[in-house]
Image: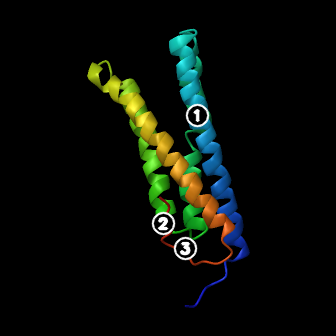
């Protein structure tokens, strides 16, 4: 099987993508922690919860851009888009409660899916970075 070496541009892009994926996981964990503070410690922390998302909401957009620039595998494009879509759904469920109060109950469920998806994306991107050859276009991680 012919294995293509990864170019320097692709390598740098993969590293940046992986770093962003790890930062995204940390941000999602911190966001959930802030929500816990608001529920169990002080409701004033809801302000922090609402503000903190603005600090990391564009990470999946940057990851999506990097996945195209760096010719990353299709899964990187797809999973970045999924994470971006989940963040959009988080906004929707947080803001649609006036019209449909039951939608608020879906917000923490989507947070769990976002957490899991972010971890999977970080794991796969780390494996992609540690591979020196372009032999994992359809990388499978359980």
Residue 140 numbered mark, or none: 2
**Secondary structure of residue under mark 3:** loop
Residue under label 1, please give it.
29
| Cα distance in 3D space between marks 2 and 3 | 8 Å
Instruction: Identify the residue at image location x=62%, y=63%.
Output: 127
Q: Is residue 67 above or below residue 23?
A: below
| Cα distance in 3D space between marks 1 and 2 | 24 Å
- Of marks 2 and 3, the one in the foreground: 2
**Secondary structure of residue under mark 2:** loop
Q: Along the polypeptide, which appears first: circle 1 or circle 3? A: 1
Rendered image coloring scheme = rainbow
| Cα distance in 3D space between marks 1 and 3 | 28 Å
Q: Residue 136: give x, y in percent of width and height.
A: 55, 73
Q: Is residue 115 above or below residue 130?
A: above
**Secondary structure of residue under mark 1:** helix
Give the image quarter of residue 96. Answer: top left
Give the image quarter of residue 100. Answer: top left
Residue under label 3, please give it.
136
């Amino acid at each position: 099987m012919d294995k293509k070496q990864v170019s320097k541009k692709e390598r740098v892009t993969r590293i940046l993508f992986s770093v962003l994926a790890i930062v995204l996981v940390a941000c999602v964990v911190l966001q959930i922690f802030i929500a816990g503070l608001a529920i169990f410690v002080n409701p004033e922390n809801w302000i922090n919860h609402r503000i903190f998302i603005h600090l990391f909401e564009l990470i999946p957009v940057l990851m999506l851009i990097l996945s195209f620039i760096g010719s990353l595998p299709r899964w990187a494009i797809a999973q970045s888009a999924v994470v971006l879509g989940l963040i959009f759904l988080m906004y929707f469920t947080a803001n649609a409660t006036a019209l449909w109060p039951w939608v608020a109950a879906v917000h923490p469920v989507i947070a769990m899916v976002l957490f899991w998806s972010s971890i999977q994306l970080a794991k796969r991107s780390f494996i992609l970075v540690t591979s020196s050859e372009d032999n994992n276009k359809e990388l499978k991680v359980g």
